[in-house]
Amino acid sequence: MSSRQRKLNSTSALGAHIAGLAFQNPIVLAAGTAGYGRELAGVMDIDAVGGIVTKAVSPLPRAGAPAPRVAEFANGMINAVGLANPGLQEVRTEHLPWLASNLRHAIPIVNVVGYTVADYVEVVSTLSDAPGAGAFELNVSCPNVEQGGLEFGSDLEVLGELVRRARAATRKPLFVKLSPVTPDIVLSAKTVVDAGADCLTLVNTVPGLVIDVKERRSVLGFGAGGISGNAILPIGVLATWKVRNAVSVPLLGVGGVSSATDALQYMVAGASLVGIGTGALRDPGLPLRIVADLERWCKVNCTGALSEIVGSLKMPR
Ligand SMILES: Cc1cc2nc3c(=O)[nH]c(=O)nc-3n(C[C@H](O)[C@H](O)[C@H](O)COP(=O)(O)O)c2cc1C
């Protein structure tokens, strides 16, 4: 038996079957924090996680926001990367082929961004048959230029149209990633599921501002940014629980995970998969330590597979 096979067998109690994909364990590297996989290959065994969500992909290259783009504060991180990416063609010819030839077990999920509905459709349809695209994750927290800069996620009609058209452009599983500050996350969730989403990712970063008081300036070159890390864990867990009660598709919970206990909170709230972003930026060993800790936890606390705890939260009425 190969060491890879042993690894798979030893983690089979952690396996999750989502939207026709077999994840060897529920831990997924969150969008924008693992590059296109290659960036992390020297510091961790990227094929040992359940999945890897790529950095955003837009039709054309995007330079992104001015530096500094990322800053830490107590219990969290703030970023304004501006969805910098090399664009669809480079991702198709360089990054996805690398993922396809280096991942045998972890599932690559392509994160998609755009300024118009047509941008999302172009990325999804062009990459639909690419071997390194196991699924797509639509980041709908982008400014929609056709609607005067309002985020796609905050207009239910446009949101529904976006997901319907992306759905029609591919047979690969479609994840839709929602913002925790959308006017009504349950309504957004229902809208995207009705439009054909196979899985929902909850949550994206929370808007925030961190000020350098001495300089009286934002710590970021762009100004305001998105908060991630420990500070947003309870926000993501609540969003997961609310949405779990409203839709029946599987959920990917993400936001603030830095331990197996944090990951278990998302699972008990209703997530089948758990994303790790900031925690892995700080410590690339974290995702696989969490996989090992979940396996140990499951041996003691589960009667069968870890998935039995998904959605098992007892809430007071
Ligand atoms: C530096 C950085 C870049 C990110 N880029 C993306 C992105 O390209 N697309 C996306 O949907 N989310 C992006 N995110 C959001 C993360 O995927 C995740 O939803 C968020 O950080 C919360 O998880 P965490 O607390 O584990 O980091 C980014 C987050 C960070 C910190």
Image (tube, rainbow, N blue to C red):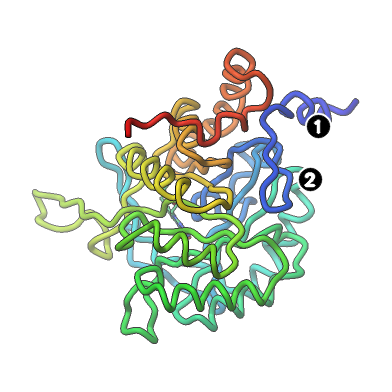
Residue at which label 2 appears: 104
Q: Position of residue 309 (x, y in %)?
A: 56, 29
The circle on residue 265 is none
Closer to us: 294 or 38 = 294
Q: Position of residue 226 (x, y in %)?
A: 32, 55
**Residue sitting at 9 percent across and 49 percent down?**
214
> Mark 1 packing: few (<14 Cα in 10 Å), some, or many (20+)?
few
Could you tell which of marks 1 and 2 lies nearer the N-terminus? 1
Q: Are marks 1 and 2 in contact (CB under 8 Å)?
A: yes
**Residue sitting at 70 percent across and 43 percent down?**
17
Mark 1 Cβ inside 8 Å of ligand 1: no
Closer to us: 167 or 117 = 167
- Name the residue at the front extreme: 317
**Residue sitting at 33 percent across and 30 percent down?**
316
Amino acid type, residue under disc 2 in the picture: Arg
Q: Position of residue 212 (x, y in %)?
A: 15, 50
Left or right of residue 268: residue 124: right
Residue at which label 1 appears: 4
Amino acid type, residue under disc 1 in the picture: Arg
